[in-house]
Amino acid sequence: MTLEIRPLHPLFVGEVSGIDLRQPLEPADIAEIEAAMDEHAVLVFRDQPLSQAEQIRFAESFGPLDTGLGKLYGSGKPPSRFDFETLLDISNVDPDGAVSARDSRKNMSNLANQLWHSDSSFQRPKAQYSMLSAVVVPPHGGETEYADLRAAYDALPEDLRREIFGLEAEHYALHTRIMLGDDGYTEEQKAAMPPVSWPLAQLHPGSGRPVLFVGVHARRILDYPLAEGKMLLAELLEHATQRAFVYRHVWSVGDLVMWDNRSTLHRGRRYDLSQRREMRRTTTDDLLPVRRPSA
């Protein structure tokens, strides 16, 4: 198989044709997709209406799967509409199939997804690939935007690049939710997902390109005064998400978008929460060691 890839942005993102994701992947197929991910960071697959089992099988071709925020809830985890623990429900739909109330905790999570982030940067291991499948899309809004962290690093002013060399940021699972007013977590829940730290400058393991690893899960910079570190993180995030580095995906039912959390940020866009939106996400763990660029 040879993938056909049409660029969708001057810097990254490719639309893939010539493959049916409902069929099992051969080792050569997996290698070709991984090489395309190293180059494009985001791949768009159109007209791929996957069943739950087909999406799980596709995702598992690339490594062990992440269970998201399941650790927060333990045995009290809310019931799922899905047959697989590693299939994550990115929707505004309750387990009974009804659209969630606007002020529900589920919609609080949806709103947090509208902030620039990389999936599971708040845990170790962090995320490698995410694959989001569109089942139901609202009539307006609900797009997903992606930002290229490789291009962001390349465009850093030299003095700022020198400043962040060797610095690490602390990422915390509940940072965005507490910031949005969802602060009803027990001490046991907070302890279940302690913060982790990652270098601000990293080398992408597949392409070897340096990336600016920022996002809204980062709440402080180690060894910096809190306020100064927060302001630097805000400046870096503003730099990384300027429009020249961003692609906006307008969803159609049956789309599957696969992205590399090690080299991109993403965010959902606003939509009317009274309108049904159903997306299914699978995410692989990043098991490779983090490397830093040379000085």
Image (spheres, grey):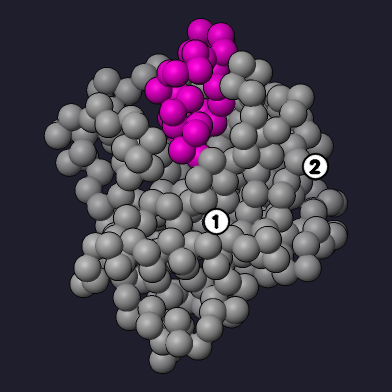
Q: Quadrant of the C terminus?
A: bottom left
| Res. 39 visible in picture | yes
> Could you tell me which residue is drawn at 72 percent across and 59 percent down?
13
Residue 223 in magenta?
no
SS at badge 2 = loop
Task: Please tell me the numbered disc located at residue 265.
Answer: 1
Q: Which mark's residue is nearer the viewer, 1 or 2?
A: 1
The stretch in magenta equals 84-113
Calculate the distance from the C-alpha at mark 1 to the C-alpha at mark 2: 21 Å
The residue positioned 40% from the left and 23% from the top of the image is 105
Q: Is residue 54 above or below residue 284?
A: above
In the figure, 57 relative to 51: above or below? below
Residue 210, disc: none
Which residue appears at 47% of the width and 67% of the height? Answer: 236
The residue singled out by tag 2 in the image is 46
Q: What is the x, y in percent for residue 24?
A: 68, 43
Q: Is residue 87 above or below residue 102?
A: below
Q: State whether residue 215 is above or below residue 166.
A: above
Q: Is residue 243 left or right of residue 97?
A: right
Q: Amino acid type of disc 1?
A: Leu
Q: Is residue 87 magenta?
A: yes
Q: Residues within 10 Å of mark 2 (few under 14, many from 20)?
A: some
The secondary structure that most of the magenta stretch takes on is: loop
Given residues 35 and 136, the one toward you in this image is: 136
**Residue lying at 80% horizontally and 58% vertically, measured from the top left:** 8
